[in-house]
Amino acid sequence: MAVKLQTIKDIRNYLTGELSELYAPEELRSIINIIIPSAFEISNVTYHLKENEEITNREKIDTVIRYCSELKTGKPLQYVLGEIFFYNCIIKVNPGVLIPRPETEELVDLIVNENRGFKGSLLDIGTGSGCIAVALAVSFPHSQVTGIDISHPAILTAMKNAENNNAAVSFLKADLFKIDQLEIQKADIIVSNPPYVRNSEKKRMKKNVLGFEPHKALFVPDNDALKFYCAILNLARHILNPGGTVYFEINEAMGKTMNDLLESCGYNDIRIIKDINGKDRIAKGKRYD
């Protein structure tokens, strides 16, 4: 389909017209302010200053039209662009891995701020895109970071992200529920953002999440909602060093339940931490024995 677009202003108007029924005005403005600078490899400032200049690179226009076509299917913007900026790192994403969320960035920020100058060993369980492991390896350049995941495609994506961000991370393909603790080195910090959305909560989720993101990385049975946390804490009994800390991203509805679970597993200094929106989102605890 031939679309006559001559300036960036034309492109902005085109995207507004094509996508206005799918996105609220504020969200659409945000999307356009990401798409155009990305396609034309220019800054946001340049994009606004040069919006009336004629475009000579038709391939860039074709890229915008392709982005628009993909967005109209409901595909998340991050998958359309193939990457996301996450805690000072560029993280490649695809439908084989979850899109990193702001609350996961808050989890990383907490770990960084509480462990300045960390030089120990850190294990990221269910690493997915590797965003947590990569960001922490960059923040703790003298640490030993390992990420594990059951998905081979996810491991490949995570390895690429580590390489692209010059992050020293080791990755291991492993099933959390079958893993031999001897396969993994002892850790001073264990972090995980495991599946925690209960199946009954699907109806409240956006269609673009349900239609494009990997369900195995999102959902758990209502009657076994803590299965991944229990498995991680069982593994931690064998591999977490004395004085070590676990950090979890959690379901906002399960703060009290996670607190009780950590207590029952012998953890101290337990905290349930709210995210920027005031929702219980992070659980942490320390083991001294």
Image (spheres, rainbow, N blue to C red):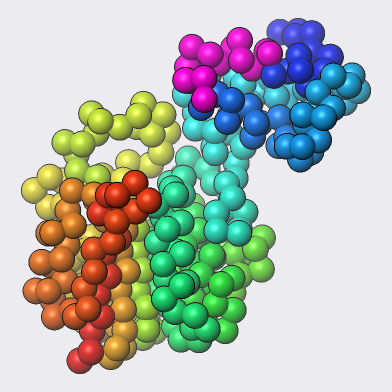
The chief SS type of the magenta part is helix
Residue at point 81% right, 35% down? 46
Judge left or right: residue 109 versus residue 227: right
* Nearer to us in this view, 113 or 168: 113
Percent across and percent down for residue 234 are 19, 74
On-image quarter of the C terminus: bottom left
So how many labels did they put on this image?
0
Q: Where is residue 201 in the image (x, y as percent from the top left)?
A: 20, 36
Is residue 152 visible to us here? no
Q: Quadrant of the N terminus?
A: top right
Magenta segment: 13-26
Q: Is residue 217 above or below residue 44?
A: below
Identify the residue at image location x=56%, y=62%: 159
Vertical order, 68 against 133 (above or below): above
- 15 in the magenta segment: yes
Image position, residue 247 (x, y; %): 32, 69
Nearer to us in this view, 182 or 205: 205
